[in-house]
Amino acid sequence: MRRSEARTGRTAPRTARQVLRWLASLLASLLGLVLLTALAGAGPAPAAEHRRDPAVIADNPYQRGPDPTRESITKPGTFATASMTLPADAGFRKGVVYYPTDTGQGTFGAIAFVPGYNGSWAALEWTGPWLASYGFVVMGFEATDPTDGDTPRGTQLLAALDYVTQRSAVRDRIDPHRTAVVGHSMGGGGALSAASKRPSLKAAVGLAPAVFSTDMTTMRVPSMLMAGQRDTTVTPSYTKNFYRQIPASTEKAYVELTGAGHGFPSWTPNPVMMSKVVPWFKIFVDNDDRYSTFLCPLMDSTGISGYQSTCPLLPGGPTPTTNRYEAESAPAVCTGTIDSNHTGYTGTGFCNGDSAVGAQAEFSVDAATAGTATLALRFANGTTTARPTSVAVNGSTVQTPSFEGTGAWSTWATKTLTVALKAGTNTIRFDPTSPAGLPNIDHLDVTTA
Ligand code: GCU
C-alpha cells in the first residue's frame, strides 16, 4: 500500500540529472516569484514514544507564557525579545540569535532555522522575534554555501543548535535537551535530514521541504510538513508523499496553505503559517498540551486547504533521566592525579590528566536501553589554547571535540555531545590528542530518554 503510494506519488529526484533539473525548476520559479512580487510592487526589499505522560503534563516545568487562544496564536507571543548578530568567527553566515529577555522563568527550548537554496536570512528574519516571543531561543543563519543541498543544511542546523546551546552568550537561558529545527525549501529538507540524524530533537518543521537525502520511513522526531497549495516547485503532492512515508508511530502533521506559492514563509509575516508552527513547537519542545487543541482537530481552518495529522498530538515522551559520574571516583579512571586545588568542582575533586597524548579520563556509564544519550562533560581549561581530544564509546572513536579555554582553572564549562549507547555498561573515554593533555575534568552528566 505504502509502496504503491510512493511509486505513484511525485517522489524525490534521486539522480544527479534529476537534482539538476529540479534545481533549474526551483531557480525558474524563484525568478518568477521575484518578477511577480516586483510587478505587484511588494518588492522583496525589505511517536508512540512521544505519547502523553500524565506526570509530565500535570506539572509541566517547561510551560511558558499565558493560556493561548484561537486569536492570540495568529499573532506574536508575549515575551519581550532581543537579538544579537553572531561574529564571523562563530562559523555561521549571517547568524542571528533571537531570545526572550525574561530570565525569571527558567530555561527555554532552542530552535535553529535555515533558509532555502540561495535563500537569505533577511527573507525569514520576521520569524525570529515572532518565535522567540513565545519563549524560544531561535538561531537563524544562512547555509555555508548558498547552493548547499539538504544534507549539509541539516549538518549546519545541528551545528547551530550545538553552538547556541553550548557556546553562545545566551547558552545559560537554554535547556539543551529541548531543541528543534525548521527550514524552508532546501532548508526544510535540511531540517528533516537533521531530525533523522539526531532523534533526540523534540520537533522538526519542513516548510515546502525539498527532501533529497532523508529516509522518512525511519523518522522518529515529531515532524510538521507544510505545503503551499499553488507551489509548483515543491508541490503539495510531493510534500504529502513524504508526510505519508513518516511512520504512524511518529507524531506528524501535513498542513497546506490556501493559494500559497513556494515563497510563503519569505519576506511578509505569515500569520496562518505561524498559527500552526508555533503550536507544533509548543507541544513538542515545551510539552505544552494547551496547544494540542489548535491542531487536534484543526481548530481554525482559515487559509488552510489541506490538513492531516496523527491526532491526538500529545507531548510527553519518556522523561529523560540524567546520571552524574564524577571523574574522581571509581569506576572512573584518571590517567593523572585527582586534584582539588581549583574551586568550583562538584563532588570531591577533579581529574587533572597528565600532559601527554593518550593520558585519558574514562567513565563507565549505565544505560537502561540502547539509544541516543546526551553527554555533558564539565571541564576547565585555564590556558588560551584549546585541547583536542577523541571520544571513544565502547572502544570506537565517535567524536573529536576540542576543549577551548574557559578563562581560568576555576572557571568550569560544559560541553555537550550526542552519542549512541548500548543497553548495559558502556565505557566512554576522553583521549587527548595533543601533548598538553586533557583539560581538567570535573564530571560527566549522561541523559538518556
Ligand atoms: C596548571 C593547573 C592544573 C592543570 C594544568 C594543565 O598546572 O593548575 O590544574 O591541569 O595547568 O595545563 O593541564
Image (cartoon, rainbow, N blue to C red):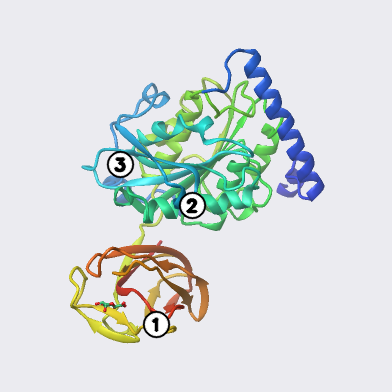
Give the image quarter of residue 425. Answer: bottom left
251 w.r.t. 39: above or below: below
Q: Quadrant of the C terminus?
A: bottom left
Dot 2: what SS?
loop
The answer to whether any part of residue 447 appears in the image is yes
Residue beneath the point at 51% across and 28% down: 273
Marks 3 and 1: CB-CB under 8 Å?
no
Residue matched to label 3: 63
Query: Which comes sooner in the sequence, label 1 or label 2?
Result: 2
Give the image quarter of residue 210. Answer: top right
Q: Residues within 10 Å of mark 1 (few under 14, many from 20)?
A: many
Residue matched to label 1: 360
Marks 2 and 3: CB-CB under 8 Å?
no
Give the image quarter of residue 340. Answer: bottom left
**Location of residue 131 in the rendering, given as x and y in whole percent from the top left corner:** 41, 35
Residue matched to label 2: 91
Type of residue at label 1? Gln
Type of residue at label 3? Gln
**Location of residue 147 in the rendering, given as x and y in whole percent from the top left corner:** 66, 44
Dot 3: what SS?
loop
Residue beneath the point at 55% across and 54% down: 155
